[in-house]
Every structure is written in C-alpha cells, then in structure tokens.
Image (cartoon, rainbow, N blue to C red):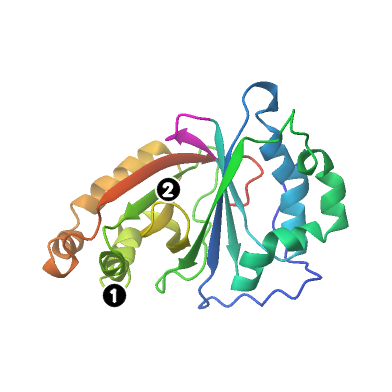
C-alpha cells in the first residue's frame, strides 16, 4: 500500500474551488471490528475510496484514528465537498465508478457472517463564514488532531456561539495563539444537535498544550469570553485527540 495524494481529476462536473465558497464537511465515523479484521476500513479507504474520491475531484480527505477519546475501535473520515450535491450524492457517485467497485469488492460485498465493520455514523456540516475551506495546517509523522464538539441548549444559543467565532473574532484569536484550525462547521444533521464541530492540527501533543496555554491567557480572548452577549451558549463539550493514518491527505 502507498500514500495517495489528492488530485482533482474528475469526470464528474465538480465545481471549481473558490477560496471564499463555504464547503460542506462530511464526517463518517466507523465503529470497527477487533482482532485481524480491525484494519479493514482503513485498508478500504487507502486502496479504493481515496483514489475514487480523487477521480471525482473530492478532497483532501482526512483519515484518523483515536488517540484519546472513545473506548472502542473506531475510525474518523473527513470528506470536504465543494457543493451540497456531492455531499448528498457521494455514495452514489462512488458506486458508479467501476474501478472503485473492483478494488473495494471484498469490503463492499462482505457477508453478514464476516462484516467489514460494526456500524457507521454520518454528520454533515456547513463551513463557517470566517473559515470557508478545509485547511491542512501541519505535517510530520507525529502530528495530532483535536476534534471538539460544542453542544448548545437551543438553536439560538448555538448561533450565538457561531457568531462568537466569526464576528466575535475567536477564529482570529485561534490563529494568533497557534491553535491551527483544519475546519469549523455548523452541523446540519447528525448526533448531539444543535452543535458546532471543529478540528485543530498540531505538530505534537506538547505543541497542542502550549497553544492552549497561550490562548486561555490572551487578553483578546478574555475580553471575548467575558462579553455578556456570548454568555451561556455552550452546554457540553466533547473533546477527542486523533492521529492521522499514514495515507491521510490531511
């Protein structure tokens, strides 16, 4: 198996990338098997799914495994889409690709007695105005990614928290203090709604800890945090630390 770079060489008419166009982010979570079948989902994405997405002009795609987080085997797939059409039709478009069907045959046609995975969950998000496109902020074999989900007790409260990141300037403070975003997304459908979800990238865990230490004492953040307009917007935070697999494009 070899690393597969993202290349937009699509027979399907994918819209050209506009740096100001808000992408849609599909997060696919697989609950995987244990033992010798544990790597089946990762192998399928490396050998079949990522090349097929590349032929559709969809990417870069992130493939992550938990370092700290859920206590069951799982895999997280981040798929950025330039349009709602490919976000909604992605599975159908893949199944129209004969090479995808050939290379992914054993995974796609697994038997009930020997399934490729236990189950999958999907979440669809719309990018924030102040970060409309996915980014690949870090490189290196030791890089880690932090996935954070901010739930709100109401849709109104959730929109205020989104405003805090955009108009309030919280995304800018992230950049200034070394919290390097991969994406920010408002969840359109998925679990734990209403919520916003974002991902940060770091060279290492020590790099992550140092960046958060800078952020929490930053004067601009303290003023924003204490602004009553943004009070009581988050009811629960879920925080995962992920590691990119070697063939991940993010």
User: As drawn, is 44 to the left or to the right of 103?
Assistant: left
The residue at the point 82 percent across, 38 percent down is 106
Q: Residue at x 48, y 40 (%)?
A: 242
As drawn, 17 above or below 90? below
> Between marks 2 and 1, how big is the CA–CA gap?
22 Å
Chain-order first, disc 2 or disc 1: 2
> Could you tell whether 166 is left or right of 68 in the image?
left
Tag 2, which secondary structure?
Answer: strand
Report if residue 22 lies within the magenta region.
no
* Tally of numbered discs: 2
User: Is residue 16 shown to the viewer in this render?
Assistant: yes
Quarter of the N terminus within the rendering: top right
Q: Which residue is mark 1?
A: 167
In terms of depth relative to the viewer, which is nearer, 224 or 191? 191
Q: Quadrant of residue 213?
A: top left
What residue is drawn where x is 74% and y is 61%?
A: 92
Q: Position of residue 246 (x, y in %)?
A: 63, 40
Expressed as whole percent of the image width and height from the top left, the position of residue 210 reads: 30, 43
178 vs 75, nearest the viewer:
75
Quarter occupied by residue 2: top right
Q: Nearer the viewer, residue 210 or 232?
A: 232
Mark 2 near mark 1, Cβ–Cβ under 8 Å? no
Q: Is residue 54 visible?
A: no
Where residue 182 appears, x then y in whole percent? 47, 57
Span shown in magenta: 65-72
Q: Please, what secondary structure does the residue beneath circle 1 have?
A: loop
Asked which quadrant contains residue 35, the reply is top right
Q: Residue at x 78, y 67 (%)?
A: 9
Quickly name the residue at label 2.
Answer: 147
């Amino acid at each position: 198996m070899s690393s597969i770079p993202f290349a937009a060489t699509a027979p399907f008419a994918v819209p050209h990338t506009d740096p100001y166009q808000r992408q849609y982010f599909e997060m696919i979570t697989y609950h995987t098997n244990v033992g010798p079948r544990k790597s089946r989902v990762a192998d399928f994405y490396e050998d079949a799914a990522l090349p097929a997405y590349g032929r559709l002009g969809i990417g870069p795609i992130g493939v992550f495994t938990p370092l700290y987080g859920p206590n069951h085997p799982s895999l997280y797939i981040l798929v950025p889409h330039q349009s709602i059409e490919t976000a909604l039709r992605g599975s159908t478009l893949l199944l129209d690709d004969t090479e995808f069907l050939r290379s992914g045959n054993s995974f796609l046609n697994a038997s009930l007695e020997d399934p490729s995975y236990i189950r999958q969950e999907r979440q669809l998000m719309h990018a924030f105005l102040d970060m409309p496109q996915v980014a690949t902020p870090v490189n290196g074999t030791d890089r880690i990614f932090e996935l954070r989900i901010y739930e709100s007790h109401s849709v109104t409260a959730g929109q205020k928290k989104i405003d805090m990141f955009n108009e309030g300037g919280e995304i800018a403070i992230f950049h200034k203090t070394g919290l390097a975003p991969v994406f920010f997304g408002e969840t359109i459908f998925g679990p734990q709604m209403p919520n916003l979800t974002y991902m940060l990238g770091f060279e290492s865990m020590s790099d992550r800890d140092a960046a958060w230490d800078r952020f929490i004492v930053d004067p601009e953040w303290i003023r924003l945090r204490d602004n009553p307009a943004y009070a009581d917007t988050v009811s629960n935070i879920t925080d995962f630390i992920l590691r990119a697999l070697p063939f991940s494009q993010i």
